[in-house]
Structures are given as C-alpha cells and as structure tokens.
Amino acid sequence: MTSSSKKPALLPAMLTMKCPSCRRSSVFINKSVFPLDKCLALKDECEICGQRMKSESNNGGGINYALTMILFFLNLLWYWPIFGLSYKDNSVFIYLGVSTFVVIIAQPYLMRLSRMIYLYLYTSFGTSRRVNIEG
Ligand SMILES: [Zn+2]
C-alpha cells in the first residue's frame, strides 16, 4: 500500500475551501459566505497542521477579476440555448444584464475561490510546520 491514498485530492479540497497544506480543515472561519462582511475572514492558522493562512492572503484580486470574466462568459452557455442571442433585438443587452446579475450574486463565492487559488499557488501539500498529519 502506498501512502498516496491518504493525500486528499487537490481540486475537491480547493473547491471546498480546505487548508492548502493538509487539505482537511476549513480555511475560512465561517462555513457559509454569510454574514457577507465576514465572508473572507481567514483563520490565523490551520487547526490541524498549523499552516499559517494570513501571511500571504492579502492578494487574489487579479484572480478574482479573471474568475469574474470567466463566469460572465460561462453564462453564455446556458443563456444562448435557452433564450437565444440576436443582433436584431435587445437580447444581447438582456444577456449582459442577466450575466452581470449572476456575477454579482456569485461574487462572495468568487472572492473566496480566488483567495483559495492564491493560497494554493503559494502553499503546496505538506509545507506546514507539523509535518505529521496522520489521523
Ligand atoms: Zn492544514
């Protein structure tokens, strides 16, 4: 048996906002994005492995911008087949309005996700002070 089965997969851990070093404990203080003013509150350090969270976490704005644009265009994938887009009427503007609305609603999640991506870019698995994370 290899020990690789004990290492949680990167993508699910990132999408569920888990610590980049041990991928077991939540990075954010609140599980939900509500209350919104606390939605980006990070723990000082991971309670399982001791990985520091706050040191490099002031960034992510550029990633957030990229994610916002990606989501904006992803809205085309469901809007176009359902409602259709045409230059002949106002459908393009309605799409822009709907897409903007979706992006605003999703913003707390996008901000969290961009912060997670930032953390994962700068922290690889098992870089915390407490190396042994068994059990
Ligand atoms: Zn951890």
Image: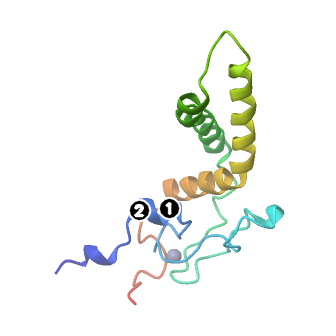
> Which numbered disc covers residue 14?
1
Tag 1: residue type?
Answer: Met
Scheme of colours in the image: rainbow
**Horizontal and vertical percent for residue 107?**
71, 49
**Pointers 1 and 2 in contact (C-beta within 8 Å):** yes
Q: Quadrant of the N terminus?
A: bottom left
Residue farthest to the left? 1
* Rendered residue at 49%/78% (across/down): 129
Q: Callout 1 environment at 10 Å: few (<14), some (14 to 19), or many (20+)?
A: some
Residue farthest to the top? 88
Query: Compared with residue 28, is residue 11 higher up or lower down, i.e. above or below?
Result: above
> Which numbered disc covers residue 10?
2
> Is the CB of the residue bearing disc 1 within 8 angstroms of ligand 1?
no
Relative to the observer, which residue lies in front, 123 or 22?
22
Tag 2: residue type?
Answer: Leu
> Which numbered disc covers residue 94?
none
Q: Is residue 101 left or right of residue 56?
A: right
Q: Find residue 66 and report its image quarter.
A: top right
Relative to the observer, which residue lies in front, 110 or 55?
110
Q: Quadrant of the C terminus?
A: bottom left
Q: Find residue 119 and report its image quarter.
A: bottom right
* Rendered residue at 43%/59% (across/down): 11
Question: In whole angstroms, how far apart are the C-alphas of marks 1 and 2?
Answer: 6 Å
Q: Is residue 37 left or right of residue 110?
A: right
* Rendered residue at 68%/44% (across/down): 61
SS at badge 1:
helix
SS at badge 2:
helix
**Horizontal and vertical percent for residue 90?**
74, 18
> Is the CB of the residue bearing disc 2 within 8 angstroms of ligand 1?
no
